[in-house]
Structures are given as structure tokens and as C-alpha cells.
Amino acid sequence: MDNSDQLDTRTLLAIAEAAVDEAESTFSAAVGAEPEIIKSPGDFATEADLSVERQLRTLLSQYTGLPVHGEEFGTVLPGEIPGEMPQERYPNQDKADGIDGPRANTVQEDIEPETYWVVDPIDGTANYAVGNPFACILLALVHKGETQLSVTEMPLLGRRISARRGHGLLVDGMPARPLPPSDPGVTQISFGSILSQRRGNLPISYRQDMLNEIGKSYPRMRVTGSVGIDLAFTAAGVFGGTVTFSPNLWDNAAGILAVQENGGVATDFAGNPWRPGVSGLVAGEPEVHATLLQHIQAVPIGTAARTAQEIRDRGGIN
């Protein structure tokens, strides 16, 4: 169902792009920044992550009056000031808030705003911290549970992918070319973290088995270290498809809409619409997506869950 008729998404996309334009200078000025906050083993934020998110929050709140939900400071309502330290609730742990998935051991769930911005100030922080250009700013607007517009800004690659529900995909402001058809000899598939311990608790062995299984059809596999770029490049046809493991709304919201707006398909590992809190997202050109899904569902999850079917029924691990 399309709920965008209640919003002026054209104006809101222009505001989102203007905010990203301003934040881009902050992003670019601090490339190579050292880790500032250790959030969990293998996961950290730099001062640039915090600065870019504060800047985007300020601009978006000022120009739209809408709440902003971000990776580093959680949900902040208009008029509130983000704290100096990142929020302590992370969806890839057991304390996700109501927007990003189920929270464990709580009595009252967070109430999701009807309309709010979702921000990842630097996706691919580990790349950014060493000067690897595969890092990006992710921005999306969610209304009544559906992403209505998105911007993926790649300052170090000079590329911008933007989308508005029902209005197609733009690559650097121009209509995107149609997705190329599947060609096993040419098609590249991006793959999420293979060794990280923190990506949604999916076992390393499971991910490695999945990589080997997918390679039977698509041997040209790529690992970029950025979920946002994986999805954006899939939407633009650089990659034929992508398999990622982040359960976080801020990682996935922008890219899912981008893929869909250029005729691609994005689902969880069970073939259902992806939802926040689920570790497992597969996206791509329709034929590529179908092939990837077949391979994924052929891989047993192993001993990390009671049964493989239980995991598939849930679309991943949440």
C-alpha cells in the first residue's frame, strides 16, 4: 500500500538532499578519524559519526519538524538535543527499540512515530576510519511503516543514489538505467560480513557456507564492508544482487527502497518483506534475487538454532 499521497515527498526529498549536501563537508573533512566510541566488540563510532548525525538531525528537524531516528543517538524528537555520547540501545543486541525490532525484557515498547527520518551518518565506519572510500551517508523517510524516500550519498566515490516511492531511481540526479539481466559470467554479487561476530548473530560457518553455495551460480562475489553501498550499487545495476546480514533499519531502509524503485526485489531469507530486527536481507534484479534465494534456502543454519526451518520461517534471526 502506498501511503505517500499524504506527504509532499518531492519537497521532502529536496530537503533531504540539501541536508546531505551540508553534512557531506563534515564527512569528507574527517576521513581517517580514529575510533571514538567502542559500542561492542568489532563495532565503533568515530567523532565524525557523531558530528554528521548531529548536523543532519539539526537540519532535518529545523526544516521539517519531524523526529529523527539514528544509529548513534536513537530517536530524538524536534526540540530535543542529542546527548554527547551515543545511545546505549543497539538493534544487533537484545535491547533494540520499538522502531528497530523487539526489545528483550521490557514491559513497555517504544511507540513508533507515524512519520520520521532514519539516519546512518557513516555506513562503513571501519572503511572510513582507514580512508577506504566505501563509506556513505544513509538517509530515509518512513511514513506509516513504509519508506517513502531515500538518499545514499557516497562522498568519496562522487556518487549519489536517491529514490522516491512511485517515482523511480535517480543516479546523480538522472534516471537510472534499467537493471541488467542475470549473466553468471558477468554478474557481481556483493556479500555482507563473512567473519564479523556481531552481524545479527548469524553463525560465521553459516555465512561461509552460504557464500560457497551462491558462488556455484555467481562466482564473482564482492565484499565492500558497507551495507548501504551494497544496496545502492545493486539498485544502480553495478551489482546484480546483494546478501546482507544487518538487522538495523538505518542500514537497510534507504537501499531497499532504491532497489525496488528500479524494478528490483528485496526480501528476507524466507522471501517475505524485510522487517527491522531480522538478520538477513537479499536484494537484486528479479531473476538474480530468485536464484540467490534458492541458494540461501539450500544452506542449513547449523546448531545456532533449533531447526533450519525455524530460521527460514522467521526470515532470518531476529
Image (cartoon, helix red, strand yellow):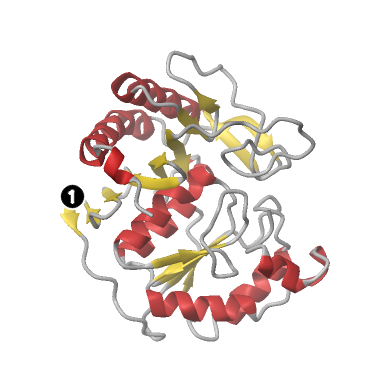
Q: Please indicate, yes or no, whether residue 290 appears anywhere in the rendered image.
A: yes
Answer with left or right where residue 42 lies relative to residue 222. right
**Front residue of 225 and 148:** 148
Provide residue 297's location: percent of width, then percent of height: 63, 77
Side (left or right) of 26 relative to 202: left
Classify residue 234 by image quadrant. Answer: bottom left
Q: Quadrant of residue 87?
A: top right
Say which residue label 1 marks. 173
Horizontal and vertical percent for residue 289?
A: 45, 74
Describe residue 318's horizontal placement relative to residue 221 as left or right.
Answer: right
Can residue 220 be seen at all in this image of the molecule? no
Kind of residue at disc 1: Gly
Above or below for 227 versus 178: above
For label 1, the crowd category at 10 Å Cα-Cα, with few meaning under 14, some 14 to 19 and many 20 or more, is few
The N terminus lies in quadrant: bottom left
- From what the image shows, is residue 240 above or below residue 257? below
Looking at the image, which residue is at 43% across and 78% down? 288
Find residue 264 and report its horizontal and vertical position in percent. Answer: 36, 68
Secondary structure found at label 1: loop
